[in-house]
Image: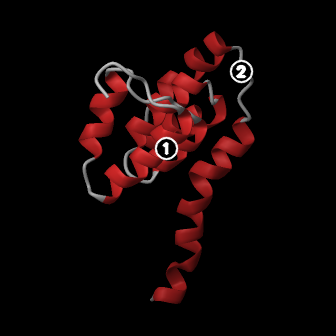
Amino acid sequence: FNTVKLSEQKSLELAKTVLQQGQSQLLEKWLRHDKLTCSEALGDLMMEDDVSKALFVYLCTESHSKAINCFVQCGKYEKIVPYSTSAGFKVDYSTMFNNLFFPILKGHWNLPNVL
C-alpha cells in the first residue's frame, strides 16, 4: 500500500470500511499522500462524514457543482466566484440559493406546528 495508488473501486471500498470504523483521519492522510483515487462517488461517501474532505475530493475530480455546494455548506461563500471563474463553470445561483435557504425556511414554516 505504500507505493501503489488504489483503483477507484478499491479506494471506495476501503473508504467505506474505514468510515464505518470511525477512522476518517486515515482517509485524510491517504488522500494527502495520493494513495486513493478520487471519484465523485468517493466525495459523496465522504460528504456524509466531513464536508471539507468531500470538498477536497470534488475539487480533484472537477465536480464543480458539488464543490460549490461544499463551499456553501462550509460558509466559504467568498470562494465560490473565484473557483467557478477559474474552472470556467457557470454557477446556477438559483439552485444554490434554494439549497441554502429552503431548509432554513422550511424549518420556520414548521415552527407553528411545533408550538
Q: Residue at x 53, y 84 (%)?
A: 112
Circle 1 Cα neighbour tier, 10 Å, few/some/many (<14 / 14–19 / ≥20): many
Mark 1: which amino acid? Leu
Q: Nearer the viewer, mark 1 or mark 2?
A: 1
Image quadrant occupied by the N terminus:
top left
Would you call the spot at circle 2 few (<14 residues within 10 Å), some (14-19), or many (20 or more)? few
Mark 1 and mark 2 residues within 8 Å of each other at the beta carbon: no
Amino acid carrying label 2: it is: Phe
Residue at the top extreme of this rendering? 86
Q: Earlier in the sequence, mark 1 or mark 2?
A: 1
Residue at 59 percent of width and 74 percent of height: 109
Tell me if residue 66 comes above or below residue 4 in the rendering: below
- Name which residue lies at 53% across and 25% down: 59
Q: Secondary structure at mark 2?
A: loop
Please state, as top left, top right, bottom left or bottom right, where the C terminus lies in the image.
bottom left
Q: Which residue is mark 2?
A: 89
Q: CA distance from mark 1 to mark 2?
A: 27 Å
Structure colour scheme: secondary structure
The percent position of residue 110, horizontal first and vertical second, equals 56, 79
Element under label 1?
helix
Q: Which mark is residue 76?
A: none
In the image, residue 6 lies at what x, y percent?
45, 30
Q: Say which of 37 and 28 sits in front.
A: 37
Please, is residue 61 above or below residue 92 in the view? Answer: above
Please provide percent x and percent y for residue 8: 54, 35
- In the rendered view, tell whether residue 59 sits above or below residue 11: above
Which residue has dot 1 on it?
A: 12
Which sits in the foreground, 26 or 71? 26
